[in-house]
Structures are given as C-alpha cells and as structure tokens.
C-alpha cells in the first residue's frame, strides 16, 4: 500500500481569461521513508504539484489517494482534517509568524498536546533538535533565514505528520546553510515521506532516495536513486492515527492570547480604539435617553404614580368620606385619598437649620407620599408623628448635607410649618426629585394646610361666588364658571365636561387659632389667638387681622389651625370646590380594569399613569419604535466604525491566519481564537467603562447633568459592544476564508 498516490492529476489556472496549466497527467506514488527530490525549470509546475499534494490547492483532473482512499470529493473541512493529519509544509519564504517568538511558533503547532507544560517541554525538545535552544525567546522577525527555516522545521516536526513537503526550502539561503537544512530535514524525516522541491539537485543528491523531474506540468523523469530504508524495515503498513476532530476552546484561547500578545503595538491600538468606541456608544445612549426624556414630558402639576386612578364628580358635589370608602371597598382599592391636592403639588421646600434659626439657600424639590417602604440602608427611622418627615433624596444632595446634619434639621414643607427630619435615604438618580414621606395623618393635615394656605395667603384668589361669572385656576384643576354653566377641565385627560347647574353661595364663619412658627399648637395654648374669619365676597387675605399677619411668620403670614377646625374648614370650604379623590390599585393594569366600573358609578375617571397620560397609545408606540430605531442606528454606525478601523489591523493577521491554516489548525479554532482576541481587546474598555460607571454613581456632580444610567443601561452598552465587535470580527473572517489557503498565502507574500 502506498501512502500517497497521484492518478492523472491535473491542475489548470484560470485568471482574467488566461488559462495556464499548472500540472497535467501526473502519475506518482510515494511511500514512507522516501526522500524525494523534485526538480524542474521555473514555471514547470513543481509548486503546483506540492500545493495539490498538501491540500492547500484543489485539483481539477484525476484523483489523489491517501492511504488508498480517494480525496476527490473532499469538502473544505475534510481537506482541513487532511492537512492536519498528514501534512507539514515548509516554504521557501518560511511562513513563520514573525510577531511570535521561536518557542511560540513551535508551540502553536503542538495543540494536540493538551497540557501546557508538556507542550512547552516538547517544543523545547524540538528546538534543541534543530539547534535553536539558544533562541527560544527570540522574536521570529529577528532571526536569520537559516534560523527561520530551522524554526519552521521544528514546527513541522511538532505535528509529527507522515508527510513533510518542502518547496525550495533553501531558496533564500546561502549554500553552507542550505546544506545544513537539507541534512536536518533528512535527519528528522526518518520513516516519513519527505518531498523537497529544489532547483539545485546537487545539494540533495547525497540524501535523496528518489529524483523526480518535472517538465511543462508533467513528469519527465522519475528515478529511484537509493533504496528506501524504511521499506526494508517493513514499517510502511503502519496506518496514520486519526486526529481529533474536536474543537478545543482552550487551544483557541491560547491561540487568541498569543495573537494578542505577539503584536503589542497593534493590541494597544485596538484597546485604545475600543475605549473610544465604547465612549461613542455611551454617548449614543445618552442622546437616546435624553430624547426619550424630552418626549415623556409630564405636566409638572401632576404626580404620576402607578395604579392611581383619579375620580371627580361631574356636578361639583363633594365626595364624602363614606362614599369614597364604599367605592374603595367595591373596587378593591388598596387605598383612597379623598383630598389629593398635595399628591399633585410640587412646590419647593426649604431646609431649616434649627441651630442657626435660618433656612438654607438650597432648595429641595419633593414629591409627597403618605406611605412607603424604602427597604434597607436608612439613616434614622420612619415618621411616627404628624410633624415628622422621612426624606428620600438624590445622592447628589449628600454633598450639601450629610445625613447626620439632616437628622438635626427641620424642613419647611410647602411653606406650611416645620417638619422634623427623622429619617433619610438616598437614591442614585440625581435627576429625579426627592420624596417626603409623612404619616397618613401628617399627610392629610399638610394636604389641608397647603390648600388653605394657598388661598388664604394669596390676594388674587377670590372665593366669592356671588358673581355670575369668573374663572379661577387651581394647580390641579382649571374650573371655569360661566353663566348658568360650569365647565370642568380635567388636566389628566383634558376631558371637558359641561354642567348646567349653578353653584350655590358659600358662606362660612370659623374661629381660628393662630400660632407663630410652631406646629405644636395643641401643646401650647398660650399661643392661641382666637379670631374670626369669614369667607364671603371679600378678599380673604385682607380679612385676616393685620396685627396677626405682622406677628406671625418671618416669611409670610402663617396660619395654624387646630385639627378639628382644619377638618371642618376643609369639609365645608374646600370640598365644595375640590371634588377630586384618588384611589390606589395594585398597578396600572388593575387600575385600568376599574375605570369602567368607576365611570358607571357616575364619576369622571382618569388614570394617572406615569408616561402614557400625555400621549395617545399609538403615539406612544410610535415614539418607542423611533427610540429603538435611533438606537439601532447607533449600533450599526458603531459597527461600521469598528469595521472601518479594524479592517486595517485585520490585514496584519491575514498572513498569520493563513499560516495557521497551512499548519493545520482547525478553521473553527482559528475563528474562535480571533473572537477571543477581540474579547481580550475589549477588557481594557470594559475596565475603563466600569470605572466610569462607578464614578458616575459616586461622583454625583456627573449625574446631575447627564441622564442617570441604570445597570441595565450599562449591560446594554457592554453587550452592544461585544455584539458589534464579534460581528465585525466574524465578517472579516468570513471574507478571509472565502479564498483557499494557497491564495491567501500568496496574496500576502506577493
Ligand atoms: P514552479 O514552482 O515550478 O516554478 P508553478 O507550479 O508555480 O511552477 O507554476 C506552474 C504554472 O502554473 C506556471 O505556468 C504558472 O504561471 C502557473 N500558475 C501557478 N500558479 C498560478 C496561479 N495562481 N494563477 C495562474 N497561473 C498559475
Ligand atoms: Mg515554485
């Protein structure tokens, strides 16, 4: 049985309508132990023959048999396995990986040894054998021609393949070195088939067992010069061991790492470049986030909260507490607030320093809550009394006040008395407003206080309703009264409801207690001043006794009411104007389900949904699609950008990859290695990005101006980066693998 048989092999090159014959009608048969010299004039087809034998180039005619099995219908993958199993190739121009060390070059060919230490040991052994033990860590590009060829021979030996092909291995060497190399080849090819192409038969004559002369693509001459030693030893029947077809991720990783470290300049450039790319993606995310934030504009007088439904009566009649409780029970609401003015109020609040007896210049903007659970990491505690408050603040405010400082201070809420701060917690998104958490009772009181104060201190507010027509604006409500007609404008839905019932005259007489700057009016009766206030056609603020105004607050007249009076005033004076209540359900979906039930009960109903109130559903969908489209556009541009910038760097790997292929490293392993390399290149940008994101959270100044990034945003960018990089890499690989090994090697060399 022959190891290798060529039957009528022909190879034709077709390029630019020129057809040239590489080889034709070649019939040859080779065995182990042969040391074949192939000679012939330049252009006679020697290289073509070797390339066909090596499986680096295809043949069109005839058949190539390896261990008696045909290769005629081999797929690309099978050729790859063929190369890995049988072929070691030594080129005239070495095809060494210039950027790797001598040792690395050999180690790459030793992937069949799984253990790294063993691999290294074997590589050193092989290099000793070719006489290079002194140059192990020398960069291949610094070697002399002879040393390069020795490295390549060591590499060829590393695979321990049965066929060694050498295409003019001494073509670039002086005659003394040439002799050494041929001698070395002879030494190492015991029991192997070694085919050497040479233009100088003299230098191989001493060792060759056979001489084949090629002329014009055909075999002109084929002579046995010496007997084949190994045939005599009967070792030819030994079959070549099958190679593992498994893809080793470990090998790919090692290869990727070698590629990365072997070109430090290029790798540094790639890393720096990817940092820029990640910044671009980061910038794109900021733009998209800003874009969304602008579109999700919310009216400032409106506090969106999930599951909140607002009901109003069309006729302006108050919703009694009993009615509201029954609605709450009927519709399974978690909570109900009959007087929800404060939920939609967003006044500025000032911090008051007890010791210095002054308010801080810094203003906090707060939403209100009457219930809430803020989990762990709380400084202080939750409020228990009506004049206590828990603050949930953006972390940026920590720069101005530490939690310890805050816990000793009071806050003026809505200009309506002082609340002791008993607890604080911070959140990361500095662009969000803080929240003030009160007890339910405290919330109700503040609610009424805010409303009353709003009217009592404002001379522009006229509560007289004797006139036939007037227009008034409440923050939450625009109510227009025309002759015999009322029009309610509900800002949550911009629904207009017309009613034709005239509103009745409101006459009220109350006794008030005024206490200066102190919320604990009940405990200190000496501060209580009895006064009478009439809600009538006169302006409210002028009916407050001037001496009281002067003696009260340092900022504005402040009126503190007893809870009973407050409630009564609220019941009679406010409820008749403010006939809105809020019901709270588990979430927006549940709330939506309840809308019809509530409408059937005769109320005007609107859902307080965070983002969807302002726009119609289809507009929402459109905007969301737009946002996604814009983001995808950025991803694609980032991909193009990376592609453009890495394409050049990829050229540098083209020859390396071709050499890996010619060495018989599996395509998949090379591809995965290139992806691994890309991932390694990404590491610095991810570290950079991690530092950036930590800075972003812990240096609040940064995220006061830029939109806040949640973990999901960071993950989006990181996975976007990985996706784009790997996509670009595989695109480039695909391009490279379209051509055969022969062509890709040639493309680089010539
Ligand atoms: P040698 O190695 O003996 O100098 P080659 O095998 O390189 O010769 O070339 C044999 C013939 O095939 C030559 O006529 C050459 O022009 C042609 N040939 C080789 N490679 C190609 C190619 N890639 N495209 C077109 N013609 C080729
Ligand atoms: Mg040639």
Image (cartoon, rainbow, N blue to C red):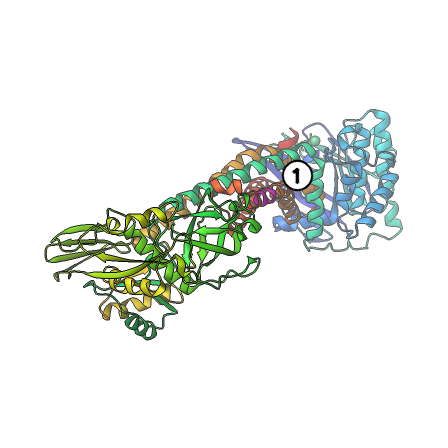
Residue 208 visible, this angle = no
Q: Is residue 694 magenta?
A: yes
Q: Residue furthest top?
A: 174
Residue 525 lies, in percent from the top left, at 40, 61
Q: Is residue 478 left or right of residue 134?
A: left
Q: Residue at x 81, y 43 (%)?
A: 157
Residue 471 lies, in percent from the top left, at 18, 50
Q: Is residue 334 left or right of residue 643?
A: left
Work out which quarter of the rendered image holds the C terminus and state it: top right
The residue range painted magenta reads 690-695
Closer-to-camera residue (166/210): 166
Q: Is residue 577 magenta?
A: no
Dividing the image into four quarters, tell me where ligand 1 lies. top right
Residue 293 lies, in percent from the top left, at 40, 46
Closer-to-camera residue (492/95): 492
Q: Secondary structure at mark 1?
A: helix
Q: Residue at x 51, y 60 (%)?
A: 374
Q: Is the residue 324 above or below the residue 68 in the image?
A: below
Residue 234 visible, this angle = yes
Residue bearing mark 1: 658
Q: Is the residue 606 above or below the residue 470 in the image?
A: below
Magenta-drawn stretch, dominant element (helix, strand or loop): helix
User: On the image, which quarter does residue 576 sit in?
Assistant: bottom left
Q: Residue at x 73, y 50 (%)?
A: 85
């Amino acid at each position: 049985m022959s190891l290798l048989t060529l039957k009528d092999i022909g190879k034709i090159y077709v390029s630019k309508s020129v057809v040239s014959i590489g080889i034709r009608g070649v019939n040859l048969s080779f065995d182990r132990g042969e040391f074949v010299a192939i000679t012939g004039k330049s252009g006679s087809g020697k290289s073509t023959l070797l390339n066909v034998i090596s499986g680096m180039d295809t043949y069109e005619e005839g058949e190539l048999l390896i261990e008696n099995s045909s290769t005629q219908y081999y797929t690309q993958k099978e050729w790859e396995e063929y190369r890995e199993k049988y072929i070691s190739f030594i080129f005239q121009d070495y095809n060494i990986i210039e950027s790797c060390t001598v040792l690395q070059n050999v180690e790459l060919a030793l992937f069949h040894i799984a253990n790294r230490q063993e691999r290294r040991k074997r590589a050193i052994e092989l290099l000793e054998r070719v006489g290079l033990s002194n140059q192990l860590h020398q960069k291949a590009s610094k070697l002399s021609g002879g040393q390069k060829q020795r490295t390549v021979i060591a590499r060829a030996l590393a695979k321990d393949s049965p066929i060694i092909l050498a295409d003019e291995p001494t073509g670039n060497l002086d005659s003394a070195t040439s002799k050494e190399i041929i001698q070395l080849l002879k030494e190492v090819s015991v029991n192997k088939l070694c085919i050497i192409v040479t233009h100088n038969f003299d230098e191989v004559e001493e060792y060759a067992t056979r001489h084949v002369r090629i002329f014009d693509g055909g075999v002109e001459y084929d002579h046995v010069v010496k007997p084949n030693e190994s045939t005599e030893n009967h070792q030819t029947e030994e079959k070549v061991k099958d190679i593992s077809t498994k893809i080793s991720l470990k090998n790919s990783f090692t290869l990727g790492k070698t590629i990365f470290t072997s070109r430090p300049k290029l790798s540094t450039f790639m890393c720096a470049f990817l940092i820029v790319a990640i910044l671009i993606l980061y910038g794109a995310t900021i733009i998209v986030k800003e874009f969304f934030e602008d579109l999700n504009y919310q009216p400032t007088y409106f506090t969106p909260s999930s599951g909140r439904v607002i009901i109003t009566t069309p006729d302006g009649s108050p919703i009694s507490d009993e009615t509201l409780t029954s609605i709450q029970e009927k519709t399974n609401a978690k909570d109900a607030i009959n007087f929800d003015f404060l939920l939609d109020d967003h006044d500025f609040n000032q911090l008051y320093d007890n010791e210095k007896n002054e308010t801080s210049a810094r203003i906090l903007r707060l939403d209100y809550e009457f219930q809430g659970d803020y989990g762990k990491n709380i400084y202080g505690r939750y409020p228990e009394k009506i004049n206590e408050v828990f603050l949930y603040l953006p972390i940026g405010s920590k720069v101005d006040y530490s939690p310890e400082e805050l816990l000793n201070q009071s806050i003026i809420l809505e200009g309506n008395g002082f609340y002791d701060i008993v607890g604080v917690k911070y959140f990361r998104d500095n662009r969000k407003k803080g929240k003030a958490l009160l007890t339910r009772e405290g919330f109700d009181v503040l609610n009424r206080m805010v409303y009353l104060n709003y009217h009592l201190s404002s001379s522009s507010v006229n509560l007289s309703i004797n006139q036939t027509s007037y227009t008034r604006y409440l923050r939450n409500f625009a109510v227009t009264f025309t002759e015999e007609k009322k029009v309610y404008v509900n800002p949550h839905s911009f629904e207009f409801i017309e009613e034709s019932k005239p509103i009745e005259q409101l006459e009220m007489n109350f006794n008030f207690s005024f206490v200066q700057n102190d919320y604990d009016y009940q405990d200190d009766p000496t501060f209580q001043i009895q006064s009478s206030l009439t809600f009538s056609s006169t302006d409210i603020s002028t009916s407050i006794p001037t001496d009281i105004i002067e003696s009260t607050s340092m900022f504005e007249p402040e009126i503190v009411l007893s809870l009973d009076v407050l409630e009564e005033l609220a019941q009679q004076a406010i409820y008749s104007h403010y006939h809105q209540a809020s019901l709270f359900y588990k979430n927006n979906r549940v709330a939506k389900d309840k809308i019809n039930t509530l409408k059937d009960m005769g109320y005007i109903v609107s859902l307080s949904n965070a983002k969807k109130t302002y726009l119609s559903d289809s507009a929402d969908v459109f905007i969301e699609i737009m946002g996604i489209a814009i983001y995808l556009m950025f991803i694609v541009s980032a991909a193009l950008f990376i592609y453009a910038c890495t394409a050049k760097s990829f050229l540098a790997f083209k020859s390396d990859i071709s050499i890996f292929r010619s060495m018989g490293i599996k395509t998949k392993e090379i591809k995965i290695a290139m992806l691994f390399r890309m991932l390694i290149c990404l590491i610095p940008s991810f570290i950079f990005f991690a530092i950036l994101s930590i800075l972003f959270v812990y240096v609040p100044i940064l995220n006061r101006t830029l939109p806040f990034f949640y973990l999901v945003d960071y993950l989006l960018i990181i996975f976007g980066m990985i996706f784009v990089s790997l996509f670009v890499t595989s695109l480039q690989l695909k391009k490279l693998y379209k051509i055969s090994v022969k062509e890709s090697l040639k493309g680089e060399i010539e």
